[in-house]
């Protein structure tokens, strides 16, 4: 694998988000990735090499920077396919971006699932990487001329007095499909009362009428939200932009944490204390949150010594855009030999029907949700193998787009205490954190 040229350092930008959006907007016809981790944005422009595992996990395709494809049948666990790609194509200083679909865990566990059309696994080494933080911008690439071109673009962008961001908003009815969703929630409640599982998160899709301008949506959506992580990518014919409310798994060397974020209500008014008190004392929301914590602890227990697992910030009220959630931080120390690929599938599986093992989990999901989920409730991720860094965020509060459709998706946690009408309204509230900021593509005449 070729090496990155020496990075070029630039002064910090006036506005990190504007700089990132400017880069993506100028490369909207190319493949790109961005991932916001704490106070730093990582941007990848074009693919140096990528790994795509198809929606049924049978074919793995390596795509080089010229678009040449080499496919082979998958003959080993997908975790090992990912590890081999990372080992072969890791370059010092270069982040690898990626995504895993909701069905990823079911596939590696040998469970039956309803396949979608998006990849089960996608990993990308970018041709050029830009790291944007308040104090500096770093640009590096496999080819000096590509890095120099981005440096010139950034200089021009930083010095530009006006950044033009389209504002053609999509008009969307988020209450479509109400009766269908409430019926599925009622079914889930009945099955929970029968003891089939303790919690479920049925979701619903809301189609968008117009093609989405993803960079502009990233700009407006991030301005209005307070996500745990933000991401946006375009890889061939699939695109997603998300304002994720929770970190699924984060590893720094041998320290790992996940976030339990369950229990939701609309944040109304400037004074948050009354709604905070209400959320902390709502039996249904508290019960839902405790189930999420137990599931996170159980999953970490498979890859961490039991005495290293701890819950911090127990049941803190966390604002995420226009809603509030109950939040707890669950952490531990990785058992030697374990890594992010050991952790990720189980934590994805914990989201929708926590506490239900094996095939019963996917059977339950198929009962209350007939459409495949593709990337919704999967993970977007960034990693640096040499640095021992692995960070994956849950794909929620996200806009999706492929060749034929564009949509939003939201779910609600259902327990024995749930009310179908309230759970439907919760999905509307979650959609409300994204819908007002979805920007339609401007059709050039």
Image: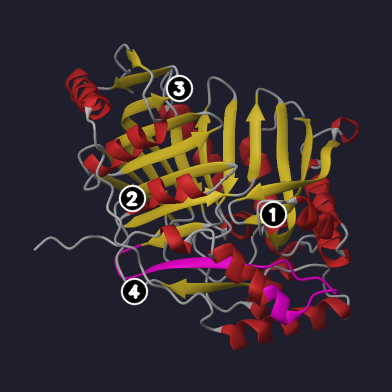
At x 40% / y 28%, what residue is drawn? Answer: 89
Choose the circle earlier in sequence order: 4 or 1.
4
Q: Mark 1 sits on what residue? A: 324
Circle nearer the N terminus (1, 2): 2
Residue 134 badge: 3
Q: Residue at x 69, y 63 (%)?
A: 352
Would you identify the image quadrant in which residue 146 lies? top left
Q: CA distance from mark 2 to mark 4?
A: 17 Å
Query: Residue 442 location in percent, x, y?
Result: 21, 60
Q: For the residues marked 3 and 1, what is the alpha-carbon distance in whole angstroms?
A: 28 Å
Residue wearing tag 4:
209
Distance (Cα) linking label 2 and label 3:
21 Å
Task: Confirm whether the magenta stretch covers residue 408.
Answer: yes
Q: Secondary structure at mark 2?
A: helix
- Find disc 2 in the rendering and name its residue: 216
Give left or right: position of 295 versus 130.
Answer: right
421 left or right of 145 in image: right
Residue 48 seen anywhere in this rendered image of the structure:
no
Neighbour class for label 3 at 10 Å: few (<14), some, many (≥20)?
A: some
Image spot of residue 91 (x, y percent): 41, 22
* Left or right, residue 341 beside residue 49: right
């Amino acid at each position: 694998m070729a090496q990155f040229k020496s990075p070029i350092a630039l002064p910090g930008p006036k506005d990190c988000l504007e700089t990132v959006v400017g880069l993506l907007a100028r490369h909207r016809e190319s493949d790109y990735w961005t991932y916001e981790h704490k106070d730093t944005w990582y941007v990848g422009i074009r693919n140096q090499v990528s790994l795509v595992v198809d929606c049924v996990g049978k074919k793995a395709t390596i795509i080089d920077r010229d678009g040449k494809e080499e496919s082979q049948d998958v003959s080993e666990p997908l975790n090992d396919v990912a590890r081999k790609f990372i080992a072969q194509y890791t370059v010092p200083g270069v982040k690898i971006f990626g995504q895993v679909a909701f069905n990823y865990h079911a596939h590696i566990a040998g469970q039956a699932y309803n396949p979608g059309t998006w990849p089960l696994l996608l990993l990308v080494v970018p041709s050029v990487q830009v790291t944007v933080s308040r104090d500096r911008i770093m640009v590096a690439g496999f080819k000096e001329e590509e890095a120099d071109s981005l440096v010139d673009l950034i200089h021009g962008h930083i010095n530009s007095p006006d950044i033009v961001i389209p504002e053609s908003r999509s008009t969307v009815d988020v209450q479509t499909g109400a009766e269908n969703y409430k019926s599925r929630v009622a079914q889930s409640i009945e099955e929970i009362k029968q003891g089939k599982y303790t919690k479920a998160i049925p979701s619903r899709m809301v189609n968008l009428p117009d093609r989405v301008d993803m960079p502009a949506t990233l700009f407006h959506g991030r301005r209005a939200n307070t996500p745990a992580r933000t991401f946006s990518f375009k890889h061939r014919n699939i695109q997603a932009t998300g304002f994720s409310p929770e970190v699924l798994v984060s590893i720094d060397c041998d320290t790992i944490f996940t976030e339990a974020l369950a229990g939701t209500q609309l944040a109304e008014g400037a004074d948050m204390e009354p709604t905070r008190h209400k959320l902390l004392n709502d039996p249904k929301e508290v019960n839902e949150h405790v189930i999420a914590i137990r599931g996170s602890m159980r999953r970490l227990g498979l890859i961490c010594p039991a005495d290293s697992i701890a819950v911090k910030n127990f049941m803190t009220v966390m604002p995420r855009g226009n809603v509030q959630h109950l939040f707890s931080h669950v952490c531990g120390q990785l058992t030697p030999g374990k890594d992010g690929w050991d952790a990720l599938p189980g934590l994805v599986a914990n989201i929708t029907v926590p506490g239900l093992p094996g095939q019963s989990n996917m059977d339950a999901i198929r009962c209350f949700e007939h459409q495949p989920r593709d990337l919704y409730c999967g993970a977007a991720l960034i990693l640096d193998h040499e640095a021992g860094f692995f960070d994956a965020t849950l794909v929620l509060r996200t806009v999706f787009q492929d060749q034929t459709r564009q949509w939003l998706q939201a779910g609600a946690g259902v327990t024995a205490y749930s009310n179908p009408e309230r759970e439907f309204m919760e999905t509307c509230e979650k959609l409300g954190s994204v819908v007002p900021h979805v920007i339609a593509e401007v059709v050039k005449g």
